[in-house]
């Protein structure tokens, strides 16, 4: 079964309404449903973006900067890896994620390296 990354982002550019916050599903119940179905692989929230370190190697030298890799209204807040039958199935799972109700969830299929 294909695996999908649910990249959880906080999105300060499109604020959620109070109704969205109140209507969001419980994250533990969402995860438990996937665990019970044998479709949950792994997932965790991340420390705040301000604690991130970005690493680049240029000319053989390591360059490290504080903070996230990009300046934007969206920052990566966590991730989940799930198994789904198709992209449409993964999107349905992502739509049930509580963070989709108040922020954003990017869905990407893992590819197999040759």
Image: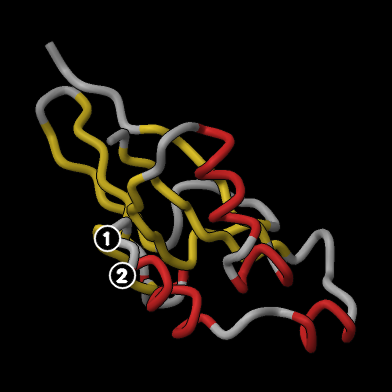
Q: On the image, numbered disc 1 is attached to which residue? A: 38
Question: How far apart in space, not on screen, are marks 2 and 1 (Cα)?
Answer: 5 Å
| Quarter of the figure that contains the N terminus | top left
Q: Residues within 10 Å of mark 1 (few under 14, many from 20)?
A: few
- Left or right for 50, reference 14: left
Task: Residue 93: give x, y in percent of width and height.
Answer: 54, 55
Element at badge 1?
Answer: loop
Residue 53 vs residue 77, the one in the foreground: 77
Determine the residue positioned at 65% across, 57% down. 95
In this figure, what is the number of numbered marks?
A: 2
Q: Which one is in front, 21 or 82?
A: 82
Quadrant position of residue 85: top left
Q: Furthest residue to the front? A: 37
CB within 8 Å, label 2 to label 1: yes
Locate residue 88: give its quadrant.
top right
Q: Position of residue 63 (x, y in %)?
A: 24, 44
Which disc, if any, is residue 21?
Answer: none
Residue located beneath label 2 in the image:
35
Residue drawn at 10 percent across, 27 percent down: 60
Coordinates of residue 36 in the picture (x, y in percent) = 32, 71
Residue 78 x %, y %: 42, 65
As displayed, is residue 10 above or below residue 73?
Answer: below
Q: Quadrant of the C terminus?
A: top left
């Amino acid at each position: 079964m294909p695996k999908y990354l649910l990249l959880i982002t906080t999105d300060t550019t499109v604020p959620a309404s109070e109704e969205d916050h109140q209507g969001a599903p419980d994250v533990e119940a969402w995860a438990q449903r996937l665990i019970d179905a044998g479709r949950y692989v792994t997932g965790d929230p991340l420390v705040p973006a301000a604690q991130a370190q970005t690493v680049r190697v240029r000319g053989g030298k390591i360059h490290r900067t504080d903070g996230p890799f990009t300046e934007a209204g969206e920052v990566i807040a966590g991730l989940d890896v799930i198994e789904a039958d198709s992209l449409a199935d993964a999107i349905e799972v992502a739509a049930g994620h509580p963070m989709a109700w108040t922020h954003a969830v990017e869905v990407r299929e893992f590819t197999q390296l040759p």
